[in-house]
Structures are given as structure tokens and as C-alpha cells.
């Protein structure tokens, strides 16, 4: 087949055009995202129990939900969260789970529960789909909150229908309601309860089809419509009569307002009241295409917006993706140019062109396969493509160099092409298979980091497979045509000829001399190399080279997350937010002066109340201040530097119990520190959590330490007095009347346009806020008489926890913390905690147990699967080489290149000041598949000379000289393809550079050592008489 494609006038070009066309046409179908999807499947069951405390929710809902799903297969973890008024059960499924079947099974089990409290709403079971945020649109206008919400809903509808953006939510508002606040004194005079008034409103606010009338001529529908859809219309509802028979309407005893349920649910954008359109993407959407549509929407709507209305893009998470993709593409082109330039130094221009032409062919063919397999273009897949630039050239260079060697022997062009390809065919196939063994083992990485990192081998295997096809079926044809025209080309330029002559002289003299010396002192050389390997490993053990699970990503958003003590008022939270915003504006003025053209560093400031990603609770005591910073490509500072300055400028504030400055989490791995403590006693859990937090805060570089269980607002506990039943009351009667008065009762729900508005009836807020009024609250008896609450019930005070979390059936408190990676290491801190502090706490609180989540767990899971996969890959390499070389020992000589590469990995990170990380280890494992290829080429030639009858000493020297150019070129092209990324100064390259450092420095170290290590190792094997001439099979 090789000869056929080499000689056929059109076959090779048709195959090439097919791959190019398939790749180009598939490009629009490939989605773009920052990282590959890495969230495991989850199922969520939510149950609403209005007004219930977290303890009541836990006992009445969570325990029953856990019992119901206990025993279902494929559940990896069960979490149940109890907060005021609701429970949420989250089931983390394993990879074997069928999500559709599990949804049915969970729904069936929960529906079978027959002892839920009567007050609960129907449980909702659904797949928990983690949609990825893309961008927000901030809408500011000089109008009322209800009018702003209505305008935002209108824009949301336009964005979804006219711009094909499916996932849009309006944020910054709670439930819209007409609130009816009743006067307590008037209620007493009428002898009515809040529930009575709510029923009156519901009965008089009716719209109902009432049948039809059939006449001889036509039919008529009968519809009763007494619906009231504005506060003014509600005011006219009759609720009773006075002593003189006059009608008492709702407006006489109540104030009706058009408002939102929670005052604290609001957003300020650059200090102005705002609505947010939060745009997200699902797993199938392309983030950048959605961002383009939203940007066009903002431009179009701003042009036609009323005076005083302003639309701005904010919280743009897609900008990071665009910056990184642009950076990667730019570095990719630079890498291709460097690879071509390297090739051109050793071959003619035409020859180099056709060798390099295989890159776009394999790339586009690979993109076609990616589209068919549902893979995305993301940061990690682009790293795989960049790595492929150099690796793909290896096969082409080996083939081209072999053809050139046959031409030097005087063979005709057609024969030289065919014979040259056939000679290296076994070695190239072996190299490909060993590379696939190594990269294939990485396809089975576990954990979130593993799900992200395995995008690299996925892409590499696809592209390398197509590059092999191109190298054997397309390249020989092009080289044949090129060589037929070679005579017409001009001789190489003087500097190039001088370079080639110098290279040949070095290869024939100094290299040969060096190899001979190494072979002569082989034991000393091998000992020195192993000493260097041990020293390199010692840098990790000794702490000179630190380990960091995943490099920090530098985004464009900084946040201050605020938690005040539960029960704090909205005004207290607003005061803290004002201080933080003032500090941000002050720093913006100072830091903007350092930026070219004085562009503001802080583009926008968003203050969002009743929102905090760390809090797992709601209320007026929490808030988030978010800064949109100038893009990473335009500013000259790391986001962590700005956050540190912001933290220092604000200083210590007395009010917050937690004030954390950070950028939103990007990428896999979870929180830097996440310790879960489990115990049956909530107070013991909280006490242990406090000690854990104190321990963690002692480490320099640890900040933002907090837990997820806090004491809530003070509660008034109402209990019946002994003998209260003699008054004709019971607990249900009292609870219902108190609930209606102080929590509120829904009288009706009305649909106005696209909005659902509830009519909520409750006591006047001022009167309901008086504890004396609570004690004197009139309980309406069945005969219409009234009795003060304090007469029949006691009122005591207590505090309970805001949130109770149960994991796998045990009460759990989670302690979180963030790390400054320049000062601390999360892995080391967790290890020290397990050794020193955890045993003390378990002894102090019997029954206490710990789990470690976040980066620690994910790093361990991914690292373990990487190590296991790597060992399997190495066995595959050994098996292939053992078959090819017909030996059990010679494969180990080839595989010596792998630990040698580790020397380069370690010292590369030390020299460039980077910590070792999971991407670094991924680079090292990937490197194993690359460096083995050079060794295979060298060993193959040594075997060839041994089989021809040369002694081992002469064979290793000849092989080193003959394969030096190929080994040198394959290493140089691999490094050249990644060199632009290695020298990239952009902040966007931080997550990629550890992987690139591993490959570039590792390949240089292994190439240098392989050229001498393998000859020395072979000479040692010869000393023991294990290198023999192969017998014919």
C-alpha cells in the first residue's frame, strides 16, 4: 500500500483533501468551553415545609428521605440539607448509574413515604444539572422595583425568543406579592383572625368558567369574573360590617402594597438599583457563541431603551475562555513556525514544507473525529493539540531522515522513498503503539481533575492516529515529487551550509568521542546518573520543590463574601458593604494610574444582598461585593495581588463573622481545604469546628476559614400551659393563627402577564415586631371570643442552628479554607492536621470522625488512578518492546529514558519558580510516551548492527552517530512546538505552563542522557553476556 500511494498520481492528494474538508466543515459543530465537563451526575429531591425550624425539617423530612433511598444501587454519597422551611436531598451517583432509571427509582421511593407532615408541599425530584454561568446583563433604571422587574422580564423574553439564548434568569428579586398588612386593633374589634381575612379575600377574588347557554342562534359561554389584579382593586373587598351596618372594606383595616417578599433580595450595580439577567449554558451549548448573542442583544436593546435605562455586561466568565483560546491559538501558530524553521535547517525548503504539511492534515482530521465523539475545544484539548505539533513531527522526521539516508547511498528516488519508509516501519509502528499505551492509560483518570486532564490524551490519540496515516500514505507521495524536483533547487545558503557542516562534524567527532568515553567509564556514568535522579527526588522530599494540586487561574472577577451574625438587620449589612465598596473605589484610583492610558482597573462594582456562595443560607445578614476587573491581557497585575491589597485596606471589621476575599472558583479540584467532621451531637460538632478553625488559622497563608453551621436568630418557643385545653384550644389552632399572623397566609395567586403574584396576608410589620404584642396576641376561639396568647401558653427563648447537614446519614459540619500558594501548601496542612490535631479531637469528642474533601480528596483520587494507569501503560510498552526486540532485558534499556526525563521535570520547575502540580505530573506521564520513541530508534539501530555481526562497542557508537540527527530533530521539534507557551508571559498561561515545563525540560534532559545512557547500559548488558545476535524465526 505504501508503494501504491507513493506512486499513484492522485490517491494521496485525494485522501489529504478529504481529511481537510471533513475537518473544516466540522469546526462550527465543536463547542468551546473553558474546561471539559467534570461534574458527576446528581439527583436532587426538594421538600418544602413552610415555617419549620432546621431541627424539625431534619427529623420530619431528612431522616425519612434518607431511609427511603437507602438500598438503591449506584449511589456514591447522600447529602441532606435541612434549613428553615425546606429540605434538600442530593444523591451523588457513580459512573455506572443510569440517570433516567435512577430518577424513576428515587421518585417511586419518595412517593411511598406516608408519614410526612401534612403541611409539606409535594416533593420535587429532578436531575441536578450544573449549568455553567456565561455572562450577566445588569439593567439599571430610574423607576420602582416592581417596574424594573417587569422590564427585566420583558427583556428576558426578548433574549430567549429573538436571540436564541435558552438559559436566562432574572436575579435581584424575591417573590412578587401584594402584601396585605392588617391592623391588630381593628382585627380585635372585628373578632377576626388573619386566616379569616385571607379566606374572605380568596372567596371574593374569583374568575371561574360557569357553563354555557345554548340558544337557537348561537351558544354563549358563562364566565364569572370578579378577579382583582391591582392593590387598588383589592382595597374594595368587603371583609365585615360595622355596628351600624356599614360595610367594612379591606382598606379600612389594612395597608396593601405592591412589593417583593424580601427587602434584602436586591442588587446594586455601580451604586444603582439593578436587575440582573443571568445567562448560563448547558452541556451542549458553546459559551462564546452565547456571549456573542448576548453582546448583540445589549447593543440592540440599549439603542431602543427608554431614557434613564442602561444595560451593561458584567460577571463575564466567557472572557477568560476567549483570552485563553486566543492565547493558545497564537502560541500554536508560533509553534508550527518554529517547528518548520527547525526542519528547514536540516532539509530543503520543499522537503521541510511537505513534512510540516502533515500538521494541518492531522489536526483537521482530528477535529472531525472530535466533533463526531462530542469532544469540545477547551484549554486542555488545545494543550493536547500543541503537544501533538512536536510529537506528530517525530514520525514524519524519522521517515524523511530514513529516505534521505537511502538517497545518500545512491538509490533512485522511488526506491529510496519506498525502502526508506519500509526500513523504519516497525520502529514507527512500535513508537506509535508505545505512545498510545502511555496516553491510553490516562483516559481512565478518576476525580474532577482527572476528568479535566484526560482531555489531553483524548485529543492526542486521535491526532496521532491520523498523523500516522498521513506519514505512511500521504507524506511519501509528496516527498517523492519533491525529490524529483530537487535538482532544480538552489544550493543552501552559506550560513545553513555552515550549520550543516558543523553539525556533521560534531556528530562524527565530538559525539563519537563522548559516547566512546561514556562506554569506557560506563559504571561511573550510570552511577552518576542515578545519583542525579536521587538528588532530584530529594528536592520534593526536602521541600525545595513544593506540590500544588492545581495551579491557580487568574480570572477577571474578585469578590468579597460577607456573613454577619444571623439576626443582623439589612442596614447593618449595608453599612459593611459600603465600607468594602469604598475601599475598592479607593484602590481603583491608585492602581489605575499604573495601567497604560489610565484605564480603570475596576470596571464595575456589583453589590448583591442575600447572596453568598460560601454561606449555604439566606437572610439579610449575608452579601457579596463583586468587582469586574480589566481583562487579564490588559492589566499588569495578578488578581491575587489586588485581592491581598483589598483585604489589607479594609482591615478587620467588627460586625462580620466571616469576610472572605477571593475570585470565584474556576477549574476542578474544589476548595483548597475542606474538612468534614461527623458526630451525632450538634454542639460537639460546633465545638470541634471551632478548634479546627483555630488550628488552621495558625498557618501563614491560610485565610477565609469558616464552617457551614451557624447559630440562627433567637427564637420564641411557644408551648401550651397545663390545662389550656379547658379554654377550647389546642396546639393546632394556636399554631395556625400564629403562623398566619406572623409568617403570613397566602389568600390567592393571580397571573399578571408572565408574572405570578401572590396575595399575602399578615399582621402589620411594626405591630408584629413587638414582643409585648405577641404576648397579648388574641387567639380567636370557636365561639368568636378572644383570649390573650400569654394566658394559655408560655413564651421561652432559644437559639437553634440555621442549617443542619447530614452526609451518608450522619450529622456533618464542613470547615473550609483558602490558601495563598506562595506561603502554604494545602496537601501538607491536611497531612499535618491528620497527624497532630485529628487524634486529639477524636479523643476529646468520642465518636467524632473526619473526611477530607476538596483538593485533598480529588488530588488523591486522580493521583492514584494516574499512577495505576501509568503502571499499566508501562507494562504495555514493555510488552511491545519485548516482542519487537525478542528480549526481556532490552526493553528496560529503552525505558530508562522515563526516569531520566523526571530529572528535567524537577529542575525545570525549580529554575522557573513553579510548584509541581497535577498538570506537571500529567506532563511527565505524557513525556514517557515521547521519550521512549527516541530510545526505540537508538536501540533499533544498535540491534541492527549487532545482528550484522558488529561487536556491542562498535554498534552503540555507530548507532549513536547514525541516529543523532533523528533523535536531535524529534526532540527539537517537540520542544519547539511548545516553546512559545513556555515563554508566554500572559496571565492566562499559568494553568498550562507546568505541563509544558515538564515536557520541554524533560525531553531535553532525557535526550541528552539517552544518547549516552543507552550505549552505557548496552555495554553493561554485554559485560554480562546477555546481548546476542538475533536468530532468524
Image: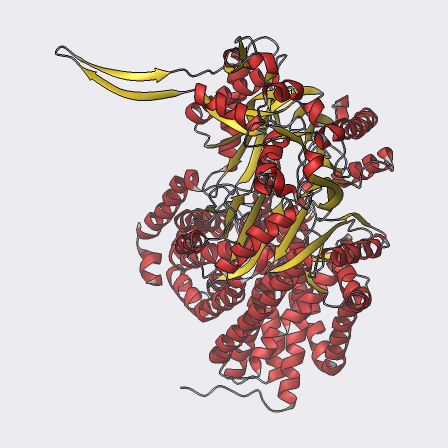
Residue 547: which quarter of the image?
A: bottom right
Look at the image and tell me in which quarter the C terminus lies: bottom left
At horizontal 54% and vertical 72% (from top left) the residue drawn is 872
* Residue 55 image point, x, y percent: 65, 49
Residue 930: which quarter of the image?
A: bottom right
**Number of numbered discs on residues:** 0
Q: In this view, does 596 lie above or below 130?
A: above
Q: Is residue 343 visible?
A: no
* Residue 204 image point, x, y percent: 44, 19
Q: In this view, does 653 lie above or below 115?
A: above
Closer to the camera, 773 or 326? Answer: 773
Colouring: secondary structure
Look at the image and tell me in which quarter the N terminus lies: bottom left
Q: In this view, does 1028 lie to the left or right of 270?
A: left
Q: In this view, does 866 lie above or below 458?
A: below
Outermost front residue = 726
Q: Is residue 121 visible?
A: yes
Outermost bottom residue = 1025
Closer to the camera, 813 or 658? Answer: 813
Q: In this view, does 321 lie above or below 423?
A: above
* Residue 367 image point, x, y percent: 44, 47
Closer to the camera, 251 or 552? Answer: 251
At horizontal 68% and vertical 28% (from top left) the residue drawn is 264
Closer to the camera, 933 or 448? Answer: 448
Amino acid at each position: 500500500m505504501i508503494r501504491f500511494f507513493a506512486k499513484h498520481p492522485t490517491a494521496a492528494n485525494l485522501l489529504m483533501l478529504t481529511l481537510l474538508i471533513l475537518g473544516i466543515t466540522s469546526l462550527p459543530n465543536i463547542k468551546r468551553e473553558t474546561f471539559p465537563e467534570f461534574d458527576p451526575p446528581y439527583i436532587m429531591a426538594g421538600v418544602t415545609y413552610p415555617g419549620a425550624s432546621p431541627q424539625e425539617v431534619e427529623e420530619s423530612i431528612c431522616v425519612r428521605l434518607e431511609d427511603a433511598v437507602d438500598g438503591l444501587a449506584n449511589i456514591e454519597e447522600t447529602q441532606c440539607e435541612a434549613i428553615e422551611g425546606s429540605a434538600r436531598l442530593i444523591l451523588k451517583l457513580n459512573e455506572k448509574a443510569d440517570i433516567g432509571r435512577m430518577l424513576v427509582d428515587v421518585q417511586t421511593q419518595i412517593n411511598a413515604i406516608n408519614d410526612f407532615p401534612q403541611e409539606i408541599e409535594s416533593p420535587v425530584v429532578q436531575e441536578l444539572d450544573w449549568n455553567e454561568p456565561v455572562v450577566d446583563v445588569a439593567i439599571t433604571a430610574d423607576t420602582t422595583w416592581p417596574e424594573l422587574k417587569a422590564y427585566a422580564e420583558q427583556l428576558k423574553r426578548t433574549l430567549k425568543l429573538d436571540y436564541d439564548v435558552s438559559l436566562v434568569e432574572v436575579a435581584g428579586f424575591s417573590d412578587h406579592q401584594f402584601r396585605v398588612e392588617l391592623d391588630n386593633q381593628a382585627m380585635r374589634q372585628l373578632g377576626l383572625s388573619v386566616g379569616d381575612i385571607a379566606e374572605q379575600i380568596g372567596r371574593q377574588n374569583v374568575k371561574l368558567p360557569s357553563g354555557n347557554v345554548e340558544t337557537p342562534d348561537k351558544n354563549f359561554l358563562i364566565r364569572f369574573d370578579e378577579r382583582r389584579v391591582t392593590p387598588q382593586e383589592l382595597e374594595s373587598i368587603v371583609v365585615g360590617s360595622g355596628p351600624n351596618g356599614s360595610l367594612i372594606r379591606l382598606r379600612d383595616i389594612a395597608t396593601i402594597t405592591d412589593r417583593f417578599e424580601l427587602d434584602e433580595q436586591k442588587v446594586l450595580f455601580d451604586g444603582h438599583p439593578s436587575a440582573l439577567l443571568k445567562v448560563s449554558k448547558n452541556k451542549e451549548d458553546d459559551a462564546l457563541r452565547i456571549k456573542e448573542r448576548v453582546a448583540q442583544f445589549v447593543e440592540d436593546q440599549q439603542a431602543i431603551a427608554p431614557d434613564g435605562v442602561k444595560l451593561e455586561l458584567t460577571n463575564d466568565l466567557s472572557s477568560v475562555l476567549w483570552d485563553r483560546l486566543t492565547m493558545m491559538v497564537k502560541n500554536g501558530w508560533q509553534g508550527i513556525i518554529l517547528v518548520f524553521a527547525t526542519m528547514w535547517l536540516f532539509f530543503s525548503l520543499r522537503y521541510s514544507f511537505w513534512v510540516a504539511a502533515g500538521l494541518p492534515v492531522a489536526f483537521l482530521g482530528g477535529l472531525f473525529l472530535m466533533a463526531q465523539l462530542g469532544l469540545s475545544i477547551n484549554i486542555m484539548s488545545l494543550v493536547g493539540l500543541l503537544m501533538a505539533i512536536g510529537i506528530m513531527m517525530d514520525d514524519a522526521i524519522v521517515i524523511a531522515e530514513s529516505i534521505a539516508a537511502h538517497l545518500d547511498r545512491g538509490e533512485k528516488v522511488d526506491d529510496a522513498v519506498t525502502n526508506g519508509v519500509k526500513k523504519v516501519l516497525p520502529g514507527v509502528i512500535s513508537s506509535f503503539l508505545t505512545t498510545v499505551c502511555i496516553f491510553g492509560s490516562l483516559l481512565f483518570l478518576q476525580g474532577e481533575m482527572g476528568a479535566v486532564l484526560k482531555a489531553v490524551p483524548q485529543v492526542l490519540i486521535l491526532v496521532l492516529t491520523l498523523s500516522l496515516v498521513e506519514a505512511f500514505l500521504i507524506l511519501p507521495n509528496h516527498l517523492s515529487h519533491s525529490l524529483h524536483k530537487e535538482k532544480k533547487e538552489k544550493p543552501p545558503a552559506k550560513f545553513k551550509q555552515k550549520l550543516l557542516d558543523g553539525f556533521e562534524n560534531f556528530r562524527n567527532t565530538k559525539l563519537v568521542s563522548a559516547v566512546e568515553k561514556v562506554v569506557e567509564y560506563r559504571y561511573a556514568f550510570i552511577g552518576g546518573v542515578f545519583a542525579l535522579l536521587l538528588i532530584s527526588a530529594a528536592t520534593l522530599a526536602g521541600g525545595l520543590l513544593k506540590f500544588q494540586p492545581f495551579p491557580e487561574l487568574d480570572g477577571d472577577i474578585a469578590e468579597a463574601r460577607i456573613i454577619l451574625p444571623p439576626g443582623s438587620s439589612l442596614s447593618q449589612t449595608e453599612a459593611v458593604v459600603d465600607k468594602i465598596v469604598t475601599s475598592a473605589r479607593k484602590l481603583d484610583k491608585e492602581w489605575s494610574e499604573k495601567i497604560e492610558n489610565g484605564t480603570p482597573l475596576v470596571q464595575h462594582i456589583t453589590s448583591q444582598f442575600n447572596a453568598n456562595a460560601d454561606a449555604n443560607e439566606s437572610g439579610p445578614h449575608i452579601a457579596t461585593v463583586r468587582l469586574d476587573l480589566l481583562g487579564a491581557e490588559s492589566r499588569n497585575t495578578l488578581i491575587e495581588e489586588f485581592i491581598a491589597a483589598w483585604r489589607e485596606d479594609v482591615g478587620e471589621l467588627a460586625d462580620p463573622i466571616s469576610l472572605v476575599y477571593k475570585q470565584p472558583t474556576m477549574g476542578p479540584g474544589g476548595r483548597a481545604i475542606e474538612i468534614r467532621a461527623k458526630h451525632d451531637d450538634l454542639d460537639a460538632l460546633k465545638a470541634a469546628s471551632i478548634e479546627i478553625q483555630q488550628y488552621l488559622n495558625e498557618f501563614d497563608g491560610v485565610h477565609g476559614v469558616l464552617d457551614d453551621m451557624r447559630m440562627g436568630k433567637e427564637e420564641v418557643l411557644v408551648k401550651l400551659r397545663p390545662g389550656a385545653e379547658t379554654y377550647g384550644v389546642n396546639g393546632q389552632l394556636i399554631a395556625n393563627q400564629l403562623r398566619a399572623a406572623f409568617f403570613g397566609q397566602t389568600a390567592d395567586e393571580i397571573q399578571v402577564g408572565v408574572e405570578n403574584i401572590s396575595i399575602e396576608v399578615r399582621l402589620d410589620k411594626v405591630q408584629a415586631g413587638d414582643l409585648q404584642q405577641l404576648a397579648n396576641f388574641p387567639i380567636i376561639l370557636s365561639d368568636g371570643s378572644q383570649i390573650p396568647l400569654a394566658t394559655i401558653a408560655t413564651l421561652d427563648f432559644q437559639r437553634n442552628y440555621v442549617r443542619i447537614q447530614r452526609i451518608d446519614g450522619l450529622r456533618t459540619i464542613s470547615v473550609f479554607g483558602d490558601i495563598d500558594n506562595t506561603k502554604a501548601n494545602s496537601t501538607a496542612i491536611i497531612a499535618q492536621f491528620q497527624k497532630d490535631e485529628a487524634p486529639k479531637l477524636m479523643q476529646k469528642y468520642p465518636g467524632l470522625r473526619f473526611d477530607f474533601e476538596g483538593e485533598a480528596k480529588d488530588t488523591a483520587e486522580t493521583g492514584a488512578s494516574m499512577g495505576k494507569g501509568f503502571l499499566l501503560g508501562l507494562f504495555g510498552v514493555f510488552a511491545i518492546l519485548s516482542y519487537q526486540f525478542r528480549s526481556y532485558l532490552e526493553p528496560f534499556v529503552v525505558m530508562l529514558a522515563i526516569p531520566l526525563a523526571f530529572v528535567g521535570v524537577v529542575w525545570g520547575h525549580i529554575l522557573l519558580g513553579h510548584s509541581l502540580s497535577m498538570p506537571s505530573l500529567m506532563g511527565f506521564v505524557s513525556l514517557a510516551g515521547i521519550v521512549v520513541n527516541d530510545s526505540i530508534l537508538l536501540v533499533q539501530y544498535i540491534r541492527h548492527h549487532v545482528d550484522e555481526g558488529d561487536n556491542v562497542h562498535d554498534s552503540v557508537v555507530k548507532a549513536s552517530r547514525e541516529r543523532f540527527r533523528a533523535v536531535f530533530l524529534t526532540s527539537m521539534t517537540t520542544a519547539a512546538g511548545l516553546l512559545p507557551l513556555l515563554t508566554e508571559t500572559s496571565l492566562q498561561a499559568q494553568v498550562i505552563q507546568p505541563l509544558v515545563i515538564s515536557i520541554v525540560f524533560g525531553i531535553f534532559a532525557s535526550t541528552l542522557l539517552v544518547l549516552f545512557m543507552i550505549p552505557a547500559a548496552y555495554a553493561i548488558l554485554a559485560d554480562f553476556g546477555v546481548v546476542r545476535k538475533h536468530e532468524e524465526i
